[in-house]
Amino acid sequence: MLQVDNLHVIFGHGLDLNHAVKNVSFTVGQGESFGLVGESGSGKSTVLNCIAGLINTWQGEIEIDGERLSHRRPKSFYRKVQMVFQDPYGSLHPRHTVDRTLKESVNIHHLGDANLRVVKVLGEVGLGPQFRFRYPHQLSGGQRQRVAIARALILEPEILLLDEPTSALDVSIQAEILNLLQDISKKRNLTSILVSHDLAVVSHMCDNILVMSQGATVEALSCDQLRSGDIKQRYTRQLLVASKGYDRAAIDQFQDY
């Protein structure tokens, strides 16, 4: 469903040049949940933004369902591929109701039956009709992220791009959102790409993982390998230790990749 080959992203020029993504390649099968993992600044969100069409300065090849993508995307692409952003407080228009937010993309793509689609998708993400005419400031962080997920799902995409969808939420809410995404992905047979710095989160949701550091690929492994400890690279082991909580002795031994 998704193939990325030899992806490079360079920002700036001269002394300000930043090679943010360096020769990254991976493949994601139909219905698979795939994780991009690494510390902040590792390039994982940049890869996701290239796939989503939010960055158009990349070099390499990106294919969706066998079709090679150019830097400019047709309107049909945005029905097939949708994204859920990290910050549920910044990704919703503060002066738009939930109803208006969800109907906007339906109207853009001329899908029709907007009212029925809104009611259906709100139910799917665990929000009842009483939330339909509320504004973002009247919602909790978890409820806002459910609206953001509903906005992505209302177009019935085949690929869902998830940019750290739980990192801005309370720990008590994170598991609820992850379980919701997992259930919806199975129900709809969605292909999903999850960006996270937390190996525990990725192992909960994903089938396969690509570990990144400083823009480059460190290691590719399955979640079964992760759970069994079949990890070859020191950097991946350090991420695993970090995901289990703060340990001063372990942190003092961390080394840059």
Image (cartoon, rainbow, N blue to C red):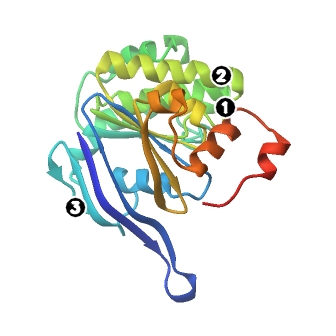
Residue 118 visible to an observer of this rendering:
no
Query: Would you identify the image quadrant in which residue 177 lies?
Result: top right
Residue annotated with mark 1 = 169
Left or right? Give the position of 195 relative to 168: left
Residue annotated with mark 2 = 173
C-alpha span from label 2 to label 3: 38 Å
C-alpha span from label 3 to label 1: 35 Å
Contact (CB < 8 A) between labels 1 and 2? yes
Q: Nearer the viewer, residue 215 or 133?
A: 215
Residue 5 visible to an observer of this rendering:
yes
Residue annotated with mark 3 = 70
Q: Residue at x 57, y 82 (%)?
A: 16
Q: Residue at x 57, y 46 (%)?
A: 236
Amino acid carrying mark 1 in the image: Leu
Query: Would you identify the image quadrant in which residue 118 lies?
Result: top left
Name the quadrant of the C terminus: bottom right
